[in-house]
Amino acid sequence: MEKLKNADDLLKYRKSLESKHRPDMVRVFVCTTGCRALGAEEVCKAFKAEIERQSLTDRIEIVDTGCQGLCARAPVLTIEPLGVFYGRVTETDVPEIISRTILKGEIIERLCYVEAGKRIPHIRDIPFYSKQKRVVLKNCGNIDPMKINEYILRDGYAAISKVLSGMTPDHVITEMKNSGLRGRGGAGFPTGNKWEFVKKAQGEIKYLICNGDEGDPGAFMDRAVLEGDPHSVIEGMLIAAYAIGSQKGFIYVRAEYPIAVEHLKIAIEQAKALGLLGENILGSSFSFDLEIKMGAGAFVCGEETALIASIEGKRGMPRPRPPFPATSGLWGKPTNINNVETFVNVPTIILRGSEWYKAIGTENSKGTKIFALAGNVKNTGLVEVPMGTTLREIVFDIGGGIPGRKKFKAAQMGGPSGGCVPAQHLDLPIDYETVKEVGAIMGSGGLIVMDDSASMVDIARYFMEFCQDESCGKCVPCRIGTKRMLDILTRITRGDGKKEDIGLLKELAEVTKTASLCGLGQTAANPVLSTIRYYLNEYEELINKKDTQAPPQQTPAPQP
């Protein structure tokens, strides 16, 4: 593979790929990442064997893709250009799909998505997809993530080419600031402002880090993007590195994501082979290299200073700030950290312009947001919607509502450090400010739906158990505060609660929130405070039942 020497080379290379594209080919896109656990690889093998047996290799192509979103129907596939979507496909379905759907255009009804008793064969008509706006996820499920050519065919690396062909670092930062893009890792800090701080920081060596340490129960947004579209992360980091003056970057991803690590390694090697990573990228004076760092799965390493300590080979524990990483981060050098979703927004903003991007979302929260929709909802999976979309639209219009005859009770937003949003706020427009007003946080995008069978006290206990277990123990408020809150919540769920426990929980929650060193402890009390705020009666009922033991209700599984 010959290296591309300049922007014209990249353009010629893409045109050569386009000339080889065959519009007459039927392409079957099969999710082989998240769907792998349910037999997707066997489905792919069956397709390839049957195509070979019937001598159809010149008419049908099988594409291994990343997550297509609708995890509840896994394994899933789409057939283009027919636009047909099939779910819960098995290898025994393959001969029929080829003979009936691909060769004759017939629909196999049992494999179709069902909504209100009606079978919907085409992906464009399925509400789960039609009501989304995919910016970050535009490539996921539509390309083979292990083939850089497929990324380039969809304008891949065109943004960094545009940047290196005529944009100064200041121009890039101005475009980011004007777009209104805020960090998608949870805090929502303006991305352009963060880049500007690092660019202006003193020091010749500056580092760039992609935070892929996604530890929230039920959350898999970053994993899906790293698995399904790794080159978009690399391109976003290239643009950020150019803007801040960095020549070295790290992608920090937990070792529990082996497919993501595998795909990242392949993507980095491919980008280097084409001259899109390394020295003098596209013939410019800009050089940048990337390295993958695998974390051991500690939730606290999602906090930026703990993550930095982990990359340095130390125990992942946060440190007081200031100094902030922008001035003194990795090995004491100015460092910029953004999460996966933030970086993937960047190339689109550069190509389509900040004005296009800022037209999406709300006044203070621009663009789209990905949510990992899980729990007691029909359509579990990955959802991307404009900021300001209501919780009702996500849960009922896209998510398909609550299974069975159950009713919506609450949604846990923002992971274990988030809060429970009750039914009275279903029409809440989801953005950074309004979510905080009701006692939750945006977080990285975890969204666990609970029906009316859930015990909210036990929900609080479940998430507090997680936070207590993941606390690094460095600061007393978090180490002791989470333990004491967990003890009280456990006692209440067992039917041994005391009347003074609610007041004590509130006091402990406030102290832990205000005195903890990092974001883990500062937000760990959110599930407690939000459930007391909206479901005080459930606490009181359990405490008042002194004569009968009240076993905890089953906590909804956060997995999709």
Image (spheres, rainbow, N blue to C red):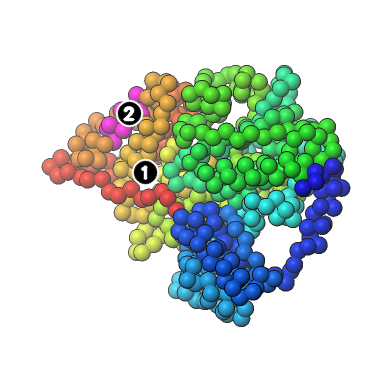
Identify which residue, 162 or 254, lies in the foreground: 254
Is 210 part of what is drawn in magenta?
Answer: no
Mark 2 Cα shell of 10 Å, populated few (<14), some (14-19), many (≥20): some
The secondary structure making up most of the magenta span is: helix
Is 484 part of what is drawn in magenta?
Answer: yes
Which of discs 1 and 2 lies nearer the camera? The answer is 2
Q: Mark 2 sits on what residue?
A: 483
Q: Tell me where residue 433 sits by quadrant.
A: top right
Image location (x, y in percent) of residue 155: 75, 52
Image location (x, y in percent) of residue 198: 69, 26
Q: Is residue 545 left or right of residue 457?
A: left
Counting residues from the N terminus, which is met first, the one under dot 1 or under dot 2?
2
Identify which residue, 500 or 272, lies in the foreground: 272
* Kind of residue indicated by mark 2: Lys
Image location (x, y in percent) of residue 357: 70, 48
Q: Which residues are magenta?
A: 480-489
Image location (x, y in percent) of residue 364: 63, 41
Mark 1 Cα shell of 10 Å, populated few (<14), some (14-19), many (≥20): some
- 527 lies above or below 555: above
Q: Dot 1 lies on which element?
A: helix
- 266 lies above or below 86: above
Q: Is residue 419 left or right of residue 189?
A: left
* Kind of residue indicated by mark 1: Tyr
Which residue is depicted at the point 24% across and 30% down?
Answer: 500
- Tag of residue 534: 1
Residue 435 seen in this snapshot: no
Q: Tell me where residue 480 sits by quadrant.
A: top left
Q: Dot 2 lies on which element?
A: helix
Which residue is depicted at the point 72% across and 72% down?
Answer: 24
Disc 1 to disc 2, C-alpha distance? 23 Å
Residue 4 seen in this snapshot: yes
Instruction: Kindly indicate whether the residue at mark 2 contacts the one at mark 1 (C-beta within 8 angstroms).
Output: no
